[in-house]
Image: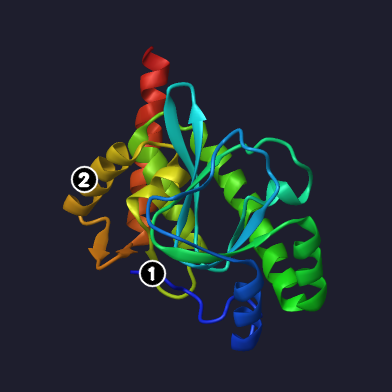
Amino acid sequence: MIDSDLDAGPGLSGEERAQLTASHGRSFSAGESLFREGDPARIAFLLLEGRVRLLKRVRAAERSLLVARAGDVFGESALLDEAPRRATAVALTAGLAIAMDKGTFLRLLRAHPAIATHVAEQLVRRVRDAEDQVEITLLRDASSKVIAALLNLSRQATGSPSFALSPVELSSRAGLDVETVKRAVSRLREQDYLRIVGERVEVPDVEALRRLYNLLGTKDELRGQES
């Protein structure tokens, strides 16, 4: 099944989407690689349907960088130069994307200012997320990393602190492998700090989760002093 979060893409009418899909559309299946780390970067993608995981090999392990959802641009280094890809893109679900070289992308932005605004907002979010991830990287405790990522997401969520999030997406935000994230989430659920409802994560008491984060930080500081 295709996981679709957009009806027509950011700022696109149904007719415009159909035209772009006919000329530049690329469909893909779950598990398919759209590009691999080290490949020449010539094409960027505007995701219309589905989810795509961006991975980077660090020594012998692969780490999730982010999970692109419908409306996201990824592989954007192709818009700057033809340097080698710095990550691998693997489809988590079946989906559809607009494949664009630099010229096509610039024409799309000129023709659709709403898309330009959407892309700019996305890049600002990525800078903010990168700053959050730098802070998380400095934490030593795996549970603290997961909680910090959840608190950041709760801060960004509008309305109730509830958001769609998969273990793969959380692992990319926490800088941990998926199994470690699953164990941490399971402990938080058992302690009633989290609820999982369908494919959504709910934080019933953000302040309680923040107090736990601060407590873990204090314990980590004390261990550091003892060592």
* Residue 197 in the figure: left or right of residue 32: left
What residue type is disc 2 on? Arg
On the image, numbered disc 1 is attached to which residue? 2
Return the x and y of residue 7 as percentages of the image width and height: 51, 81
On the image, numbered disc 2 is attached to which residue? 187
For the C terminus, give its image quadrant. top left
Structure colour scheme: rainbow
Task: For residue 214, say whether it is visible.
Answer: no
Task: For residue 68, say whether it is visible.
Answer: yes
Query: What element does badge 1 sit on?
Result: loop
| Residue at horizontal 44 percent and vertical 48 percent from the top | 149
Disc 1 packing (10 Å; few <14; some 14–19; many ≥20) = some
Distance from disc 1 to disc 2, alpha carbons, whole Å, reads 31 Å
What residue type is disc 1 on? Ile
Looking at the picture, tell me which residue is in the foreground, 206 or 61: 61
Return the x and y of residue 186 as percentages of the image width and height: 21, 48
| Residue at horizontal 66 percent and vertical 55 percent from the top | 44
